[in-house]
Structures are given as C-alpha cells and as structure tokens.
Amino acid sequence: MVGDEMALCGETYAGIGADEAAISFNDFRFYVSNIQLLTAEGDAMPFQLAQDGMWQVEDVALLDFENGEAGCSEIGNAALNGEVIGMAPSGEYVGLSFDLGVPFELNHLDVTAAPSPLNIAAMWWNWQGGYKFIRVDLMTNAAENNAWNIHLGSTGCESPAGAVPPTERCARPNIATITLDEFDFENSVIVADLGALLTDVPLYENTLMPPGCMSGIDDPDCPALFPNFGLSLDDGICPDGDCSSQTLFRVSDMEA
C-alpha cells in the first residue's frame, strides 16, 4: 500500500515524504522470518512455515509486491506473493511478531545455490553482506537525481573478501522485530505502507552513488529513514529492544 492506495507498478502517488514528493516504484519486496503468534498471557508460539519450494524456506518468507510490469520490468518478475502460510499450536492469539530480515544463519548463502526464495540475485549483495531484507526502488518527481532506493540489510560484516561469508555476526544486524497487537486472525490483515515508511524522509535530497539509503552507517540518506524501521543507524538494533517507532507495518480490517 501507499497510504490507502494499492502499491502498483506504473502508478504515481503524490504527497509522500518530507517534500510531499510524487513517487512511483520499480521494486517492492521484503523478507520476513521468526514469525511468532502472541497470546493474551504474553506467550509467544512459533508459526511453522509451510515449505512450498518457492516463497518460504525454513523460517523465512518472501513477500513480493512488484509484478515485473512498467517500471518494475527491468529487475522484477510476474509472480506476486502477499501472504505467509503455515501452522501453529491451537489456541487463542491476540497478536503476532516477526523479524523484517533474514537470520544470520541463512543470510550469507551463495545466492546461485540457495533454495527459493533465497535464490533471487536482486535481493542479495554478496556473501559478505548477505541479503537485502527489503528492497524498495523509487522514482520521484525531483527535477534531477530522481532515483531514491531503500536497500536494508546487515552492515559491518567482516570477512577477508566480498566473496567470503563472515563467521561472526555482523556489527549492525539491521533486523527489526515487528510486534502487532490487537490482531484478529479472522478479520485482520497486515498492511505494508510505503507512504508511512517514508514519513519525514526528504526524497528530494539524495546522494548520487548510489541514490537513497543502502544501510551504511555513514550514508547521508539513512538517518531520516531508519527510525521508521524502528532501528538505530548507529548499532543496527532497536533502541532498548523496542521497535515500536516503525511505521511500515500496521493492522487493518480485512475489508479495507
């Protein structure tokens, strides 16, 4: 979604970010993992993903909202996915949580040999850097320098070379744990809202190479964006473990 409108390749959306820019998008997909269902007593029960050979593997799922058309044609594909499928112990659940990202144990695979959906080159940097947890490629109506991309992933990953995976966890994991309360499993849906993610982000200001936020600690395009993921740019975690400043995800009625 972009506000109350469906996010569609080829469409333009006005009034976005600090500059109230008009945007269109060329890519919009992200990985989630570690899904937990929450009880009223505060217990968290694991949600076991179906291993479907395409969108879900182990405890990682890819959500894909680009259809390979219009501006999304260069690196996108026709297949779409807006749901996760799995099982949990029977019980009464009032909310859920999940990580926006890929766990370290799976984050530094060889993309050419990894199982789907971890085999998508457009969602991968290299062995050292791992996967792009979310990829949003935007075009704005700025007079020049009108590309603005969001590639969130772990940084500070140490290994001898880019083609060598790290053996120790990255200094800045940049994985946000999203908790959504008051979720009615019969009548609610989770909305990923690009408009809300870009709240107060100055889209008319960006560095040229590359444009937008690439997750680097010194990237001048990241400071305004990272709190909207719930993350601190300095250490790549949510302050005091609290990611509630995130604005990307919200609960909505299924009919909306």
Image (cartoon, grey):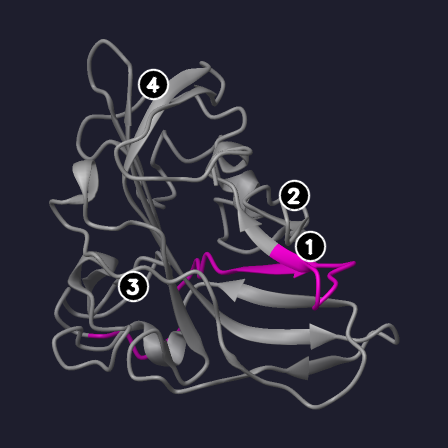
The numbered mark at residue 205 is 4
Q: Quick one: label 4 or label 1, which is nearer the N terminus? A: 4
The residue that disc 1 covers is 242
Q: Residue at x 51, y 41 (%)?
A: 193
Can residue 103 be seen from the camera position used here?
Answer: no
| Farthest right residue in view | 41
Which residue position is annotated with label 2?
245
| Camera-side residue of 127 and 191 | 191
Residue 119, picture quadrant: bottom left
* Amino acid on which the number 2 mark rests in the picture: Ser
Label 2's element? Answer: loop
Asked whether residue 95 is drawn in magenta, I would say no
Sequence-first disc among 2 and 3: 3
Q: Amino acid at mark 1?
A: Asp
In three-dimensional space, the C-alpha distance between marks 4 and 3, rounded to whole angstroms, equals 26 Å
CB atoms of marks 2 and 3 within 8 Å: no
Residue under numbered circle 3: 131
Position of residue 77 in the picture relative to residue 20 (left or right) = left
Q: Residue furthest front?
A: 255
In x, y percent, where is residue 176? 54, 58
Q: Are marks 1 and 2 in contact (CB under 8 Å)?
A: yes
